[in-house]
């Protein structure tokens, strides 16, 4: 009999079945066992092997399965106008801010700097793969998930979007408004979607359009030092009406 477990993302229950029992430990407190054999998502052995082939050799198959479940989960959530997005999502001044960039660019460094410099101000929502939700009133909300990155920092927290920061490493600290020409290709690839169907494309593009038309977005070139974090804080503070 297939063992089925349920997790909830943005208020929507998702039922999982696993190839490897050890995969569940990476979900930590997110899962609860449920009755019956019906499930929404189960990774295929082929998908796990594909993910494993792109990971360091020391990673076991159950960790590859955990990572392989991101895409199918994101595709499932699209029916609810939700999608998994690659970013560090943190709570500040009652809003969720997204630091997005390819892995290894310094997203977590910025959060760690901020938490060290202003420890009472900031809370991590999700360290790697938050869930974005486009609500019926066209507002965008940010929700936590169990995919919290290598640091494993996160909390079961939700908040309305405050803004988006596209992060780059550089030799100076500089932050400028992100143009649509730069934003669309850079942000589309951060949604955890394969864009296999017209419905997927339309849903993600609708969410991205709302993000760019209703919320501030910046491009930040940074050194990853304290000054860069203070620059980030003052910039989004100005957009939020605070300092």
Image: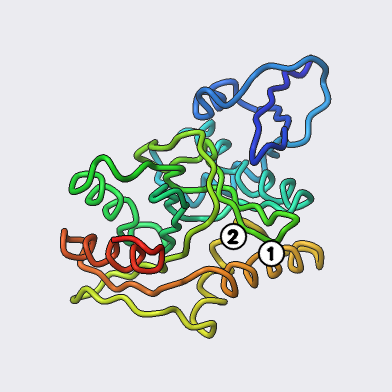
Instruction: In this rendered view, identify the residue nearer to me: 160 or 65.
Output: 160
Q: Position of residue 202 (x, y in %)?
A: 76, 68
Which disc, if any, is residue 204? 1
Q: Position of residue 119 (x, y in %)?
A: 24, 41
Q: Callout 1: 10 Å neighbours few (<14), some, many (20+)?
A: many
Picture quarter with the C terminus: bottom left
**Tag 1, which secondary structure?**
helix
Q: Residue at 27%, 65% (x, y): give it.
A: 234
Residue 176, quarter of the rendered image:
bottom left
Instruction: Judge from the rendering whether residue 138 lies leftward or rightward of residue 156; answer left or right.
Output: right
Q: Position of residue 147 (x, y in %)?
A: 50, 40
Residue 17, quarter of the rendered image:
top right
The residue pinned by badge 2 equals 191
Q: Residue at 58%, 67% (x, y): give it.
A: 211
On screen, residue 207 above or below 174: above
Label total for image: 2
On screen, residue 6 above or below 88: above
């Amino acid at each position: 009999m297939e063992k089925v477990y349920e997790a909830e993302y943005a208020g929507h229950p998702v039922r999982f079945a696993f190839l490897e029992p050890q995969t569940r430990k990476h979900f930590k407190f997110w899962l609860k066992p449920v009755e019956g054999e019906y499930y929404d998502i189960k990774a295929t052995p082929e998908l796990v092997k594909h993910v494993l082939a792109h990971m360091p050799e020391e990673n076991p198959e159950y960790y590859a399965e955990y990572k392989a479940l991101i895409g199918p989960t994101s595709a499932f959530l699209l029916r609810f106008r939700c999608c998994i997005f690659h970013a560090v999502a943190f709570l500040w001044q009652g809003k969720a801010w997204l630091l997005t960039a390819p892995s290894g660019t310094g997203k977590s460094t910025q959060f760690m700097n901020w938490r060290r410099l202003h420890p009472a101000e900031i809370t991590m929502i999700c360290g790697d793969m938050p869930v974005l939700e486009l609500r019926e009133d066209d507002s965008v909300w940010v929700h936590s998930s169990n995919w919290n990155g290598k640091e494993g920092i996160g909390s079961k927290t939700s908040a309305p979007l405050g803004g988006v920061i596209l992060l780059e490493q550089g030799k100076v600290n500089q932050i400028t408004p992100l143009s649509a020409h730069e934003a669309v290709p850079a942000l589309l690839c951060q949604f955890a979607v394969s864009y296999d169907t017209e419905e997927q494309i339309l849903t993600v593009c609708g969410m991205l359009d709302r993000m760019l038309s209703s919320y501030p977005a910046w491009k930040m070139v940074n050194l990853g030092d304290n000054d860069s974090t203070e620059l980030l804080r003052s910039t989004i503070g100005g957009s939020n009406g605070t300092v």
